[in-house]
Amino acid sequence: MRLRTLFHRLALSALVSGLAVTGLALPAQAAEEEFPFVAVLGPETVTVISGQSKTVELDIYNLTTIAAKDVVLSFGTKAKPIGADLGFTPPEGCDQTTCDLGDVKPGERRKVKFSVKPVAGAGPAIHVPVATWVGGLPSFETSIAVVQTAKGGVDLEVSDIANLKVGRGKSANVPFEVRNTGNRDVEAVGLFVFTAYSDVVPVLNYRNCLVDDELGGVICVIDEPLAGGGTFTLPESAPLRIKVKPDAPGPYEYPVIVGAVGLSGDYLDDFARKTAGAAGAELKLQSVPTASADEPAGIDDLNPDDNLADFTVAVPKSAADSKAIGGVFEGSAGQTVSVEVGVQNLGPTGTVPASFQWFPYVHVTMPTGVALSEIDESCLAGTSPTELSDIESLDGRDYVCALDGVAKNAKATFTFTGEISEGEHAPGTVTVDGGVQDAKSGNDTAALTVKLTSGGEGAGEALPITGAPAGLLAGGGVALLLAGVIAYRMARRRRIITVVE
């Protein structure tokens, strides 16, 4: 499989996981039900070379903000039990049909592994039903197709990588091991590292590595064959390192993806041209001696889903002073005007992105006497992420605008457009929830007022408004789902303005 093809596929999986964190993958359940949703993420198809066994890894995710009690993972059903011809070996500590996982915390992920070794003549494909149960009730179900092949091929697997804890301005080595569990060699190995946020960056200052702007990651090409059945690691003298920037916001667990893919001659020639004349040491792999096999040109990886390992880098808490930005609808009665409101991050670090523990947002309460005609794409009617309208209303006064991480000395603004009416104009407010990073609550709320320039009588400049910011009352179901929707909109449309002091 080509490196870009694999990377795009893996990047899509990472995107799905990221959207799940903000709620997009949640089922449309009513918030008052408070029923957790525990999903299973794994390959749709597993290809097994005849006569060999294959290990399959599943990720069990609690994709809600409430704990899941008495979680059970099941294999097969009464109607479709797992047959002996699959050669199924359950995960460690489980029986042939169930795994008792106990309680799974909000946002927690568990990894389980099972293996299969289909008997000869087992059929073209065997389906393995997999489901989760919470407190005896069904939560999620899927099916994995196991396909047997006699042709053989390349099958790279990247070993699991444990989560790391790294301080700001510090770096750490990342263990990397890749196995070719297939029965054919690869000509060379491509290593890539992708970080979802720029606050955590890979350190691969080797002459056979480069930053690929198209992919948004670092690619290294190790021009050494990896035999079928062989294993490569990175030597201590040439490690993969991850560095946390000095101003990285926290507390947050930053996702990192490390992957490997077999490469062909065409890509090697192109990469050699791009890195010609590069300085520095060369990144090499340290192999474990194994039997070799002939190199077949152009064979794709049999199971690309296990070509990567993902882990998180936990960064400790930092301070970030979020200041609300108010505004004024200024104009005459009957005039349509726009106002920009939002938040400015006064630092000293950025604000953390959304997570299961906290969803950053701005609560905008409109002043009276303004008939809205348009609201920002990042906003929905409501008072908090758990109190949202499921329709795009322009008739209310309260709106929730989703935030992601805001850099130090940057602003995130949202535009509201409306017609100024005659009569009294009671002031509104703009309130930001700065979370645990924001110890200064005095600037969390700003006024949103109306100022008539001619005709009628406006409220003018309102006095500063004080009080505690609106808290995020975490919940599941529709509320968090819609919070994810506005987060997704925000990611596409939010304008960030850098302020130079």
Image (cartoon, rainbow, N blue to C red):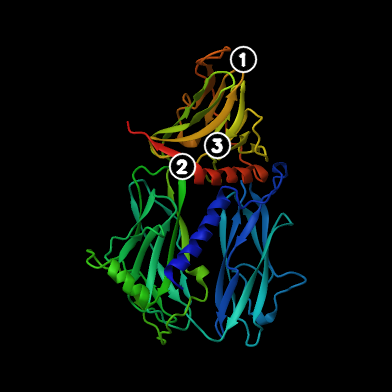
| Camera-nearest label, 1 or 2 | 1
The residue wearing badge 1 is 424
Q: Position of residue 224 (x, y in %)?
A: 33, 77
How packed mark 1 is, by other alpha carbons closer than 10 Å (few <14, some 14-19, many 20 or more), is some
- Tag 1 secondary structure: loop
Q: Say which quadrant the C terminus sits in.
A: top left
Q: Does the rendering let one see residue 392?
A: yes
Measure the C-alpha gap from mark 3 to mark 1: 25 Å
Q: Is residue 328 above or below residue 38?
A: above
Residue type, label 1: Glu
**Any mark on residue 296, and which?**
none
Disc 3 designates what residue? 376
Q: Position of 274 compared to 18: left or right? A: left
Which residue is at the front of the view, 445 or 115?
Answer: 445
Q: Amino acid at mark 2?
A: Gly
**In the rendering, at what x and y percent does residue 74 appear?**
68, 65
- Quarter-of-image position of residue 87: bottom right
Which is more N-terminal, label 3 or label 2? 3
Residue nearest the viewer, comparing 473 with 279: 279
The residue at which mark 2 appears reads as 405
Looking at marks 3 and 1 on the same chain, the residue that comes earlier in the sequence is marked by 3
Q: Position of residue 485 (x, y in %)?
A: 59, 45
